[in-house]
Structures are given as structure tokens and as C-alpha cells.
Amino acid sequence: MAKKKYNYLIFAILIIGAVIMIFPFVWMLMSSLKTTKDIYTYPPKWLPSTFNWKNYTAVFKMIPFGRYYLNSIYTSVMQTFIQIALSIFGAYAIVFLDFPGRKYLITLIRSTMFVPMVVTLIPMYLIMNGLQDTYAGIILPQVFSAFTIFLITSFFDSIPRDLCDSAKLDGCGYFRILFNVVIPNGKSAISTAAMFAFLGHWKSYTWPLIITNKEQYRTLPIGMKYLVAESSKEYQVMMAASVMAIMPVLILFVLFEKQLVKSITLTGMKS
């Protein structure tokens, strides 16, 4: 009986936590459909008196929101693809290959996780000299991630070596083993890493702000800043832009939810 009460208590705590976390998103959605009068009504109204869809079109009139949106999609997808590709090769080398200086290389990669981004901004900007206001200037400096490498490494390390040894006996080389054995068995880890990478690049603000001056290369986080200046006190317009800005992340989560849950489950099963 005591155990059942304890389970109900945990369940109640989880429900309360879920409501607290979901509340800001629901409030944002409802606010994006309100009129100016509804926004400033006191006490606050949960539902809009009329559903004002014009808030969404107003976003595109105030700033070139579509351009910023496409820029963010393009740069985030390219950064995620390159980052995951590099991380897969790096994780494969760390786990399955034995080469001189391997331990020192792992230590060097890990050490980059403790260097604050602000320390590398000036050297990175100088290295990227000539690539200002280009997509390459936005994409290339952010494709390396030690976190992503070791996230994938932790899953590759759980793949039985017997599978790779059997592939070697069948005449497979390093690349065939990677693409035919390792990657298929690490799909959940790769999907999880891709989700984290895309989210990080999608919300990236500091580096795109530094490397871009022309409007045609600005990304969505920078555009949101200009929208705040343009919309002034029209909070419903800002909420509409926020709803549209968060949609790609939600869609990505829905598509890869099973892989994310599977990766968490497999992590818990490791010895």
C-alpha cells in the first residue's frame, strides 16, 4: 500500500511539473491570437475574445521574416549535417581505431568543452576574415562540437566488437564497417545528437550577429531582435513570431521522438 501511495505522489509531481513547463507555450499560442485590447486587459484573459490571425501576417510586414526564417533553416541544417558527419567519423576513430597519440587527442578534444565561447570569438573572427556576410562564415566555425563527438562515442562504445570483427573477416574495410555495421546500430544516438545540434544552431545568436552585417544573411534570432524594436508594445505580434520560430524544433522532436526515447533507454541499460 505504501508503494502505491508513493507512486501516486510521483505521478502527481510529474503532472504538476508538466503543467508548469507547458503553460508558457500555451500562453504564447493564445497570446499570438489576441488583439491589443486583450493583451492589456486586467485581469489577464486566458482565451482571446476573437482569434486575430492578422498578427501572423503583421510579422512579415514589419521585418523580412521569411528571409530570416529561410536563412536559419539553411544554416542550421547545413551545420547539423556537417557536425554530425564529423562527429561520426571522430567517434568511430576514437572507439574502433588504435593510433599513436590517441589518448592525447581525446584529452585535447575534451578540453575544448571547458573553453568559454567568448574567449574564442575574436580569434574566430580573425580566422574568418574575408567570409563576413557569407553563409560559409556563419556555418563553418560552429560545426565542431566535442559534446556531440562524445555523445556518439558513448553509444558506439556499446556496440559489440564481435560485429566489427565478423565484418573484417568478411573482407570489409574501415568505411564499410562504419556505414554497414556501426551507423545502423547507432541510429538512435545519431538522431539524438542531431536534435541537440539543430536546436543549438537554430537558437544561435552571438556568432551570426558578429559575422553578418547585411540583412540578407541575418538569421531568425537576430531578426527577432529587430522585431522587438519594430513592434514596440505589440506583444501579440512578438508572440506570433515566437510561435513560428519554435515550429521547426517541435516538428523535429515529433519526428525523432522514438529515437530520443530509445537512446535514453539504452543509456540507462548500459553497464
Image: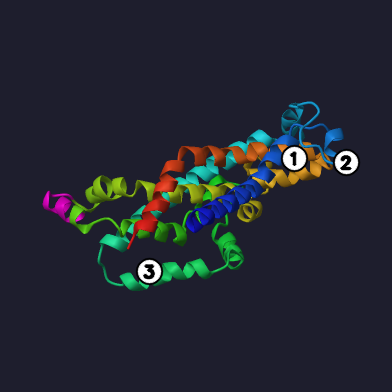
62 with respect to 197 (left or right): right
**Alpha-carbon neighbours of circle 1 within 10 Å: few (<14), some, or many (≥20)?**
many
Which amino acid type is shown beneath numbered disc 2? Answer: Tyr
**Residue matched to label 1:** 238
Q: Are marks 2 and 3 in contact (CB under 8 Å)?
A: no
Task: Please tell me whether residue 168 belongs to the stretch shown in magenta.
Answer: yes
The percent coordinates of residue 198 (x first, y second) are 51, 47
Q: How is the image coloured?
A: rainbow
| Element marked by disc 3 | helix
Q: Quickly name the residue at label 3.
A: 106
Q: Percent x, y for residue 37? A: 87, 34
Nearer to us of marks 3 and 1 is 1
Q: What secondary structure is marked by label 1?
A: helix
54, above or below 191, in the image:
above
Residue shown at the point (47%, 37%) measured from the top left: 255
The boundaries of the magenta stretch are 164-172
Between 148 and 41, the one lying in front of the other is 41
Secondary structure character of the magenta stretch overall = helix
Q: Quadrant of residue 101?
A: bottom left
Disc with the residue nearer the chain's start (2 vs 1) = 2
Relative to 105, does residue 144 appear above or below in the rendering?
Answer: above
Label at residue 9: none
Q: Position of residue 74 (x, y in %)?
A: 53, 40
Q: Mark 1 is on which residue type?
A: Met
